Image (spheres, helix red, strand yellow):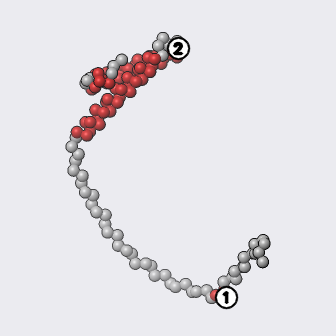
Amino acid sequence: MEKASELREMSDEQLELTLKEAAENLFRLRLQAETERSAAPSELRKSRRLIARVKTIQGERRRAAVASIPAAKPVAAPAPPAIEAKPAKSEPAKAAKPESAKPAAKPAPAKAGQK
């Protein structure tokens, strides 16, 4: 079992090799667990955790590499063209309906208990 401090001391190539070996070992252990009784079920957990540690360290290194690259100066985007207000279309005026043409409103029904 390798500790995270030991893994951090490894080179990228060594980490990649360790990851590959741990993944193959995990595969063999899973196959063994399905086909016969596994002698040490805790070995599955250890392999999974080793894989997680290696991937975590690889991710840390990747993020550190990206952070160390100087950011390019952002280029200002061109300003969007000014939007001009379009004149409203002139529609012919609609003839107003006379008041007598509207239907009469019905009175609301009285509620129970009210006079």
Q: Residue at image x 38%, y 27%?
A: 52
Dividing the picture into quarters, in which one does residue 22 lie? top left
Residue 102 visible in the snapshot: yes
Query: What is the secondary structure assignment of the residue under circle 2?
Result: helix
Q: Vertically, is 69 above or below 110?
A: above
7 displayed left or right of 107: left
Q: Residue at image x 52%, y 17%?
A: 34
19 displayed left or right of 40: left
Residue 32 visible in the snapshot: no
Amino acid type shown at disc 2: Thr
Quarter holding the N terminus is top left
Q: Vertically, is 13 above or below 114?
A: above
Tell me, for residue 12, which label it has, or none. Answer: none
8 displayed left or right of 36: left
Specify few, some or many for label 1: CA neighbours under 10 Å numbering under 14, 14-19, or 20 or more: few
Query: What is the secondary structure assignment of the residue under circle 1?
Result: helix
Q: Work out whether residue 66 or residue 3 is closer to the camera in this orientation and state it.
A: 3
Q: Residue at image x 49%, y 13%?
A: 38
Q: Residue at image x 29%, y 21%?
A: 6
Quarter holding the C terminus is bottom right
Specify few, some or many for label 2: CA neighbours under 10 Å numbering under 14, 14-19, or 20 or more: few
Q: Vertically, is 83 above or below 19?
A: below
What residue is shown with label 2? 35
C-beta proximity under 8 Å, tags 2 and 1: no
Q: Position of residue 92 (x, y in %)?
A: 50, 84
Q: Earlier in the sequence, mark 2 or mark 1?
A: 2
Tell me, for residue 100, which label it has, or none. Answer: 1
Q: Position of residue 96 (x, y in %)?
A: 58, 86
Amino acid type shown at disc 1: Ser
Dividing the picture into quarters, in which one does residue 47 lie? top left
- Residues under labels 2 and 1: Cα distance? 92 Å
